[in-house]
């Protein structure tokens, strides 16, 4: 699964596997946060979104209900960019299936 094409314009996106490891990002993510895709591949998503370290992304086979609630109410998540820069952002998570594998697409909207 490749997110190298920036299909969403200005929306920063990460693709994360079911273990919480980053599988890819788009060019908008690289622009907003300063990381290159190769620098973050196979790193835990909590490295960029520390709040996700304390929240299971998946419960059973669905997005964690607590996480879904936080997204729904517009909770601001701290995103850490290159150089330790912190940006308050809203996130939205969608489940994606590709070749029998389940991934989460995390869309990050800096405030």
Image (spheres, rainbow, N blue to C red):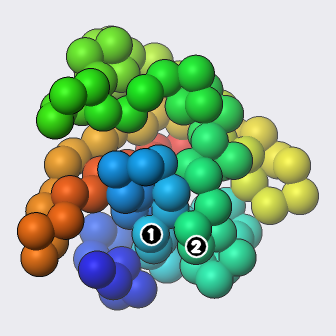
Q: Is residue 30 at all visible to an observer of this figure?
A: no
Q: Residue furthest right?
A: 83
Image quadrant where residue 31 sits:
bottom right
In the depicted structure, whether residue 91 falls above or below residue 17: above
Instruction: Look at the numbered disc 2 and give the secondary structure of its residue.
Output: loop
Q: Residue at x 46, y 18 (%)?
A: 75
Task: Find residue 5 and report its horizontal and vertical position in percent.
Answer: 34, 86
Residue shown at 32% from the left, 39% from the top: 92
Which corner quadrant holds the C terminus? top right
* Dot 2 crowding, Cα within 10 Å, few <14, some 14–19, many 20+: some
The answer to whether the residues at label 2 and label 1 have Cβ atoms under 8 Å apart is yes
- In the rendered view, would you say 3 is above or below 33? below
| Position of the N terminus by quadrant | bottom left
Depicted 3 relative to depicted 29: above or below: below
SS at badge 1: strand
Going from the N terminus, do you reach mark 2 or mark 1 first? 1
> Which numbered circle lies on residue 41?
2
**Residue 19 vs residue 18: left or right?**
right
Q: Residue at x 63, y 61 (%)?
A: 43
Mark-to-mark CA distance, 2 and 1? 6 Å
Residue nearest the observer in this picture, 57 or 106: 57
Residue in the picture at 49% in, 78% down: 27
Determine crowd level at label 1: few under 14, some 14-19, many 20+ residues with C-alpha closer than 10 A. many
Q: Which residue is mark 1?
A: 23
Q: Quadrant of residue 14?
A: bottom left
Drawn side of residue 78 relative to residue 91, left or right? right
Judge whether 16 appears above or below 8 on screen. Answer: above
**Residue 105 point in image, percent of width and height:** 31, 55
Given residues 54 and 36, the one toward you in this image is 54
Q: Report if residue 87 is visible in the image.
A: yes
> Residue 22's x, y, as percent?
50, 62
The disc at residue 46 is none
């Amino acid at each position: 699964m490749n997110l190298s094409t920036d299909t969403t314009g200005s929306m920063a996106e990460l693709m994360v596997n079911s273990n919480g490891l980053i599988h890819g990002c788009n060019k908008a993510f690289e622009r907003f946060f300063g990381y290159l895709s190769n620098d973050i591949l196979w790193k835990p998503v909590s490295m960029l979104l520390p709040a996700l370290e304390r929240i299971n992304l998946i419960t059973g086979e669905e997005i964690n209900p607590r996480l879904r609630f936080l997204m729904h109410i517009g909770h601001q998540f701290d995103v850490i960019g290159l150089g330790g820069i912190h940006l308050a952002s809203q996130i939205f998570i969608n489940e994606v299936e590709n070749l029998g594998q389940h991934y989460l697409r995390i869309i990050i909207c800096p405030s």
